[in-house]
Amino acid sequence: MKMDYQEAIRILTEKAEPVEVEEIPLEKCAGRVLGADIIAGENVPSFDRSPYDGYAFRAADTQEATEQTPVTLKVVENIRAGQTPKSTINPGEAIRLMTGAPVPTGADAVCKYEDTEFTDNIVTLKKSYKPGDNVVTAGEDISKGSELMHRGYRIDAGMMGTLASLGIMSVPVYRKPVIGIISTGDEVVEPGEELPPGKIRNSNRYTIAAALESIGLETRYLGHTDDTVEGISELISEGEKSCDLLISTGGVSVGDYDLVPDAMEACGYEVFTRGVAMKPGMACAYGKKTVTRQGTERAQLFLGLSGNPASSLTNLQCVCYPAIRKIAGLAEYEHKKTGFKSGSDITKIGKMGTRFIRGKVDFRDGDIVLDVPSSQGNVVISSAIRCDAYAIFSAGHAPVRQGDMIEGFMV
């Protein structure tokens, strides 16, 4: 009996181990996975400042100000952003300042230019202000000692700006995992080679690499081998020297020449899964061994996927992605399931195992709609073009009509 896909995900993620953390320059951090929690070492801004071009003054001096009885203050200094006030504000005084300039000592309120009448030497206010009005206080953006970012999340524009605001120029991030890709099969030739009768082009190599690189991983093509235990084992052994995880395509079914599981065992892998109850992507073999790299022992996973193009991609994205995301250091590595409105009728769901149907997410009339290509066959890779989500159906699920709600996840 084939393993349930959720059980396969659980086992893979339990056995997966994040790669180590490295320090890299801030300018190289965008899109990388943060490798440590970030605690603010200072306030941002580090001083009270003005959000406007305007005037700083004592709020107490404006308590009686109205349109009919305005208050006039003496302007004692002009301050630009980046300058430090030389004057301390006394009763009846104001300082003209630009956006971002420090609020001077003694002042506790700011007004916009357009709310005043002014000359070079005086400013007239026609309303009252309270202490703190229009003042960006020290630490209003970031408070010293606050925990701003947790490890395990990708560094986005907001994180980059926050790190720069704190003066952090060297950032701990998880090293990008290197995924080794192995192609197997006597029938496989490379895309640039002549295509003899009975042969197929090696599309899996490029499909799997693109899927992995799209989620921030590095890939390394280890080569192609015919269907022999010796040839497959040689590529596995070579990949273990430099790759954090190995993926092969082909040779995992039950035929006489499906020898990847034998090669895995010959290389010391514990093969803990031989097939998952899913369609497409049922044929697979997952294994684990302990390797020593740079003096450190760590778990090495091997993911043997089907040679059928759509099957290998579906298994990779639906079952293997959570473990791969965990290896990359991501804190939220599980699929985030959501509801879609079906964009069409779906009648061919099947009675054996979980069915994954790929589709394209669209937003129409306020709904999240999943448009499903009509062809979902094991070898039909062209229907995966622009697909960014899967719908999940249990075995024997009733046919779906256009507009019905279905469950799935984005990839």
Image (spheres, helix red, strand yellow):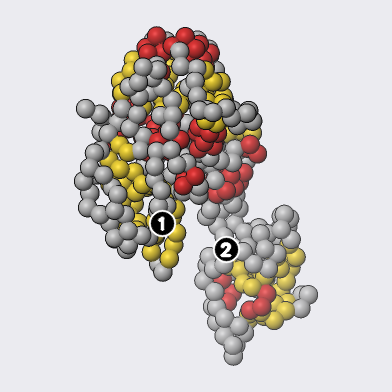
Q: Residue at x 33, y 32 (%)?
A: 282
Under mark 2, the amino acid is: Val
Q: Residue at x 70, y 64 (%)?
A: 98
Mark 1 / mark 2, whichever is N-terminal = 2
Question: What residue is shown with label 2?
Answer: 135
Mark 2: which secondary structure? loop
Q: Is residue 62 left or right of residue 244?
A: right
**Which quarter of the rendered picture does the N terminus lie within?**
top left
Mark 1: which secondary structure? strand
Image location of residue 363, percent across then percent down? 44, 62
Task: Residue 333: name its quadrant.
Answer: top left
Q: Residue at x 75, y 65 (%)?
A: 78
On screen, 250 above or below 216?
A: above
- The foreground one among 46 and 191 is 191
Image location of residue 301, percent across then percent down? 41, 21
Q: Residue at x 39, y 42 (%)?
A: 377
Under mark 1, the amino acid is: Asp
Q: Residue furthest bottom?
A: 68
Visible in this render: residue 132? yes
Visible in this render: residue 269? no
Task: Residue 170: name its quadrant.
Answer: top right
Q: Is residue 209 left or right of residue 121?
A: left
- The foreground one among 121 and 409 is 409
Q: Residue furthest right?
A: 120
Q: Is residue 122 left or right of residue 297?
A: right
- The foreground one among 2 and 135 is 2
The circle drawn on residue 371 is 1
On screen, 319 above or below 262?
A: below
On screen, 329 above or below 102?
A: above
On screen, 411 above or below 362?
A: above
Q: CA distance from mark 1 to mark 2?
A: 50 Å
**Which quarter of the rendered picture does the C terminus lie within?**
top left
